[in-house]
Image (cartoon, helix red, strand yellow):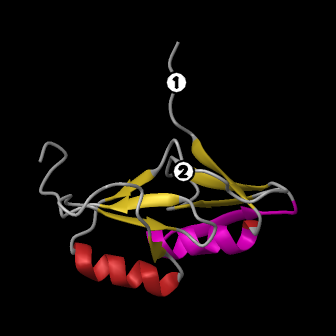
Amino acid sequence: MAVSLYQIAVDALDVPGLARFWARVLDWKVLYEDDQETVIGADGTALPGMVFVPVPEGKAVKNRLHLDLAPDDQAAEVERIIGLGARRVDVGQGDDVTWVVLADPEGNEFCVLRPKKSLTD
């Protein structure tokens, strides 16, 4: 039996707002939207995508799963993403790490890595 990753589901209080934040971060498009979900992706055929679904409560603890973003220019991307509404957060990473931990507008942590030459770097 074969399986593939279809999309990443994200709980949200402000479904359209959080979906649009991530669409701007990733330079993706809103592919579908109704009262129960907003789906974003690079295009309608590229997988995986992200689906944002409503929940009644805000985020309470550190994420058990997070996204790692691989930029060409870490400092520039960190500043761009902060300008979109993210903020720096401390999850105990220390000062000597090569990544920057940010949180999206609803507090979901993610990392902006140092530039990579390949997946094996």
As shown in the figure, which amino acid type bears the numbered disc 1? Val
The stretch drawn in magenta includes residue 28: yes
Q: Nearer the viewer, residue 74 or 26?
A: 74
Residue at figure coordinates x 88%, y 62% from the top left: 35
- In this figure, which residue is indicated by the disc labeled 1? 3
Q: Secondary structure at mark 2?
A: loop
The stretch drawn in magenta includes residue 26: yes
Mark 2 is surrounded, within 10 Å at the Cα level, by few (under 14), some (14 to 19) or many (20 or more) other residues, namely few
Residue at figure coordinates x 24%, y 79% from the top left: 75
Disc number at residue 111?
A: none
First in residue order: circle 1 vs circle 2: 1
Residue at figure coordinates x 27%, y 82% from the top left: 76
Q: Nearer the viewer, residue 2 or 67?
A: 67
Q: Position of residue 102 (x, y in %)?
A: 43, 67
Q: Quadrant of residue 110?
A: bottom left
The correct choice, above or below, for 74 with respect to 33 in the image is: below
Asked whether the residues under the numbered discs 1 and 2 touch, taking CB atoms below 8 Å apart as contact, a structural biologist would say no
Q: Secondary structure at mark 1?
A: loop
Q: Position of residue 33 (x, y in %)?
A: 77, 64
Q: Say left or right for 84 vs 10.
A: left
Q: Position of residue 103 (x, y in %)?
A: 50, 67
Q: Say left or right for 36 vs 71.
A: right
Disc number at residue 62?
A: 2
Q: Which residues are magenta?
A: 16-35
Mark 1 is surrounded, within 10 Å at the Cα level, by few (under 14), some (14 to 19) or many (20 or more) other residues, namely few
Q: Nearer the viewer, residue 80 or 37?
A: 80
Question: How far is disc 1 from disc 2 in space, using C-alphas?
Answer: 28 Å
Report the number of discs.
Answer: 2
As shown in the figure, which amino acid type bears the numbered disc 2? Lys
The correct choice, above or below, for 1 with respect to 120 in the image is: above
